[in-house]
């Protein structure tokens, strides 16, 4: 495969940095919740030392909240781990369904900041192809950034994958139209280089509010 | 009666725990999970201070700060932030924030400063 390695490399670093920043923000939030609940347990203990009754149910509830946040952090770190390992091999057998779920999870907060909900399309199916998962995650992220900047507040953006004769496709669907002028400007150098690296093609239907990426069975 | 504080954060679990801790420290705490809700509360109720996450989903921190100050210019606003650049911190102070605290915040320091502006 022939593609602009410099452009893809810089875009890849930007993408990984962006994802790391988002994940670290999530972890900060989790730590803040753990900190306040642990602080409350300390407050209760200090109050008990001063003679106030210590309510075991209250203490248990706070401990459970801390445990729930530890589980949340564990899930976040598992996703970070999957993302980090997706660069291990240039090309590998990849389940698109898994990649889409990962990107929904990793982009959820960015979407929420724009009051947009991301969800897996009901028609999405399990499709496995041989591709470059890190580049694909990067391309999905670029598509998401593009649509999130144009989607209406409060809207739902669906992502899904389907089998095709030549391989697979990934479909992004949002309820409104995509403005023609901005849609035409989407395929910049980075997107073009990323598509070349993936041997992918990108189709946009502004009227239906859809972006479709087609991918070969094997690169 | 302690300071009346409005606590704004989109993480419910954080709001609950922080509200409990500030209440234990003698404050009367109201909560809001969105800037929109917070602005409505500030318009209709009296608060001595607002403690707000700098990164809310429905409005960026600087815009939220300006909106709060527009309704009540005398309101003391304290911002909680995970990561904020020096430029963002300076901008927040210029827009009227009393102080920024890194998350997780030192509750005793936050309490001390709120009580100072209240008294």
Image (cartoon, rainbow, N blue to C red):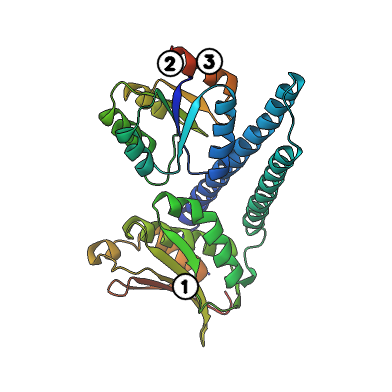
CA gap, disc 1 and disc 3: 58 Å
Residue A33: image quadrant is top right
Looking at marks 2 and 3 on the same chain, the residue that comes earlier in the sequence is marked by 3
Provide the secondary structure element on which disc 3 rests. helix
**Above or below, A64 relative to A39:** below
- Please name the residue that numbered disc 3 is placed on: B112
Q: Chain of mark 2?
A: B
Residue, far bottom:
A165
- Please name the residue that numbered disc 1 is placed on: A200
CA gap, disc 2 and disc 1: 61 Å
- Between circles 2 and 1, the one closer to the viewer is 2
Residue, far left:
A181
Label 1 in the same subunit as label 3 = no
Provide the secondary structure element on which disc 2 rests. helix
Which image quadrant: the C terminus of chain B? Answer: top left
Query: For mark 1, does the 10 Å Cα neighbourhood hold few (<14), some (14 to 19), or many (20 or more) residues?
Result: some
């Amino acid at each position: 495969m022939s593609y602009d390695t410099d452009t893809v490399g810089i875009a890849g670093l930007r993408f990984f940095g962006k994802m790391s920043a988002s994940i670290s923000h999530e972890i900060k939030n989790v730590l803040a919740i753990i900190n306040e609940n642990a602080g409350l347990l300390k407050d209760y203990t200090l109050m008990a030392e001063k003679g106030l009754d210590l309510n075991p149910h209250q203490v248990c509830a706070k401990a459970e909240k801390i445990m729930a946040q530890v589980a949340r952090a564990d899930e976040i770190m598992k996703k970070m781990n999957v993302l980090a390992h997706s660069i291990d091999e240039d090309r590998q057998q990849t389940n698109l369904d898994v990649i889409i779920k990962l990107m929904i999870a990793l982009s959820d907060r960015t979407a929420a900041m724009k009051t947009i909900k991301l969800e897996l399309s009901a028609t999405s199916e399990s499709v496995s192809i041989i591709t470059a998962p890190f580049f694909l995650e990067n391309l999905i992220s670029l598509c998401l950034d593009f649509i999130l900047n144009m989607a209406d507040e409060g809207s739902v953006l669906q992502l899904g994958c389907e089998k095709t004769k030549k391989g697979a496709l990934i479909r992004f669907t949002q309820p409104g139209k995509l403005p023609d002028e901005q849609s035409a400007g989407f395929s910049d150098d980075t997107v073009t280089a990323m598509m070349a690296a993936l041997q992918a093609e990108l189709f946009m239907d502004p009227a239906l509010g859809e972006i479709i990426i087609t991918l070969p069975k094997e690169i | 009666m302690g300071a009346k504080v409005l606590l704004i954060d989109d993480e419910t679990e954080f709001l609950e725990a922080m509200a409990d801790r500030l209440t234990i420290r003698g404050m009367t705490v109201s909560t809001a999970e969105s800037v929109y809700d917070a602005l409505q509360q500030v318009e209709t109720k009296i608060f001595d201070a607002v403690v707000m996450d700098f990164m809310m989903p429905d409005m960026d921190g600087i815009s939220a700060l300006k909106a709060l100050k527009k309704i009540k210019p005398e309101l003391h606003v304290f911002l909680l932030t995970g990561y904020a650049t020096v430029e963002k911190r300076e901008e927040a102070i210029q827009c009227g924030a009393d102080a920024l605290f890194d998350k997780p915040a030192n509750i005793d320091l936050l309490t001390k400063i709120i009580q100072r502006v209240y008294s």
